[in-house]
Amino acid sequence: MTTRKFFSTILQLLITGMITLAFPAVANERDAPSVTSGNSALATRLDEALQAFVNHQRFSGSVLLARGDEILLHRTYGWMDWAKQDAPLTVATRFNIGSIGKLLTQTLVLERVEEGQWSLDDTLAELWPDSGIPEADAITLEHLLSHQSGLAPYMTHPDFSLEQRTLGDMLDLIRTGEREFAAPGDGMAYSNSAYWVLAALLERHDRAGRSWQDLFREEIFEPAAITNARFLQPDGSYADRPRGYWFSAVGERQDRTGAEYRPGPDGGIYMTAADLWRFYLALRSGHWHSAAMLEESTRKRAPFLIPGCIVGLSWEVCDLEGVRLVTKGGTTASSGSEFVTFTHQGDDYLLVMLSNFSNAPLMIYQEALRYALELPNARLPGPRHTEVIHAAVEAGELKAMKEDYPAWAALKGLQADPMPLYVLGHHYIRSGLPKRGKALFEINVENFSGHPPSASYLKRLETGN
């Protein structure tokens, strides 16, 4: 038996609980306890924050908090169908993990880099001479993984639809799509397309001729004892898939079940929170690559869209009042997810949040952690910030907001954050209120170091493009 296969066998036995160390197995997820450690103040405060989010319809889903190898909190909040409210979510419920799936593709790529098959500096043209991808001689693996390739998202292509199903279909869109910027490495633009190109490389160089789906199954899911992963299709009917919801910036709820893209190497796989915990155990144990390679993947490369966050490779590395968060999230029109690792008082933690509310984990995870970690100015969550701001705008407070937004936000009990203003600004413009939207973007530019997304949208409003 090879060293890798021996390690894989031992790891699988550990994760499934056939032999045990300090952490509990979650083999039968329906019977898993909510809190398995019993005495974690952090878990208790996190649960309090999440309950408050649910009370304001800001979260619905599954949460798992682990300290090292020990699960501290594993429970669900909310309903499979919020209109009926007759069946609660369970820890066995699968959710769309969105772009967390990019970590799976990255893991396979970095495994091959560490084994010496590839280098992060290898260009696409070197690894695939006849790819037909624009700028292939300048795009490196590092560019693809860190969203610096310039490849535009395939879903923005005018010919994109759910009729595109195969890797070949996606590559045809990518080959004929526009570029976000001319030279690879000259900018950062989030690119789902890059991960389909990476999948093509994995397939092309696989000696067994496996598809990317089979590579996921055989090299990720099986060794990590992940048994719940499914490639559910947006236009399929599944009795055990929760209804998915989108909320407008002013709190209007819409059922958008199935409003997703097809699962791919860029994300969209359905998994449970415990599945992602098992992936974490295998990743931090060095199953696919070393701790040094994992650290290299979190090295900061380019600014991310969220203030305080920098892109590593697939990861986003964020600062939360001195706490370093290494995270990857995902969003569809009917789901949301967040996978967060951090260190607190010398211990390593994992937080997984999966939701059937669009974008909910991304919008709340830092607020939840701020309360759980008892950081300065932490408080139990209230209504959506966009709803509070909208009510104030309706009440004629826009002038006060523009004069001193941080002070105004403090009076309202809000963190001074550009995201609610940006989201609400888009809502106003779509609703035929461009002056309101423009005012909120201007507040962002004035108070948040020019806030590039708001500045870019202001420019589009000025030019009419």
Image (cartoon, helix red, strand yellow):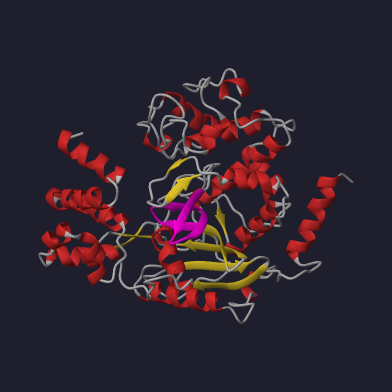
Query: On the rendered image, what quadrant is the C terminus found in?
Result: top left
Q: Residue at x 61, y 66 (%)?
A: 346
Q: Residue at x 13, y 64 (%)?
A: 397
Residue placed most toward the observer, 162 or 64? 64
**Displayed quadrant of residue 48:** bottom left
Q: Main secondary structure of the magenta part?
A: strand
Residue placed most toward the observer, 2 or 168? 2
**Displayed quadrant of residue 188:** top left
Residue placed most toward the observer, 222 or 80? 222
Q: Residue at x 54, y 32 (%)?
A: 197
Q: Is residue 431 visible?
A: no
Q: Is residue 354 above or below residue 128?
A: below
Residue found at the far right of this picture: 1
Residue found at the far bottom of this picture: 38
Q: Position of residue 365 (x, y in %)?
A: 44, 63
Q: Is residue 175 above or below residue 378?
A: above
Q: Position of residue 79 (x, y in %)?
A: 45, 71
The reply, left or right, for residue 176 in relation to residue 408 is right
Q: Is residue 54 above or below residue 226?
A: below
Q: Which residues are magenta?
A: 316-338
Q: Is residue 461 visible?
A: yes
Q: Residue at x 70, y 68 (%)?
A: 27
**In this figure, what is the number of numbered marks?**
0
The reply, left or right, for residue 109 in relation to residue 133 is right
The reply, left or right, for residue 402 in relation to residue 372 is left
Q: Position of residue 169 (x, y in %)?
A: 50, 31
Q: Is residue 166 above or below residue 327?
A: above
Residue placed most toward the observer, 464 or 323? 323
Q: Position of residue 95 (x, y in %)?
A: 51, 59
**Residue 335 magenta-highlighted:** yes
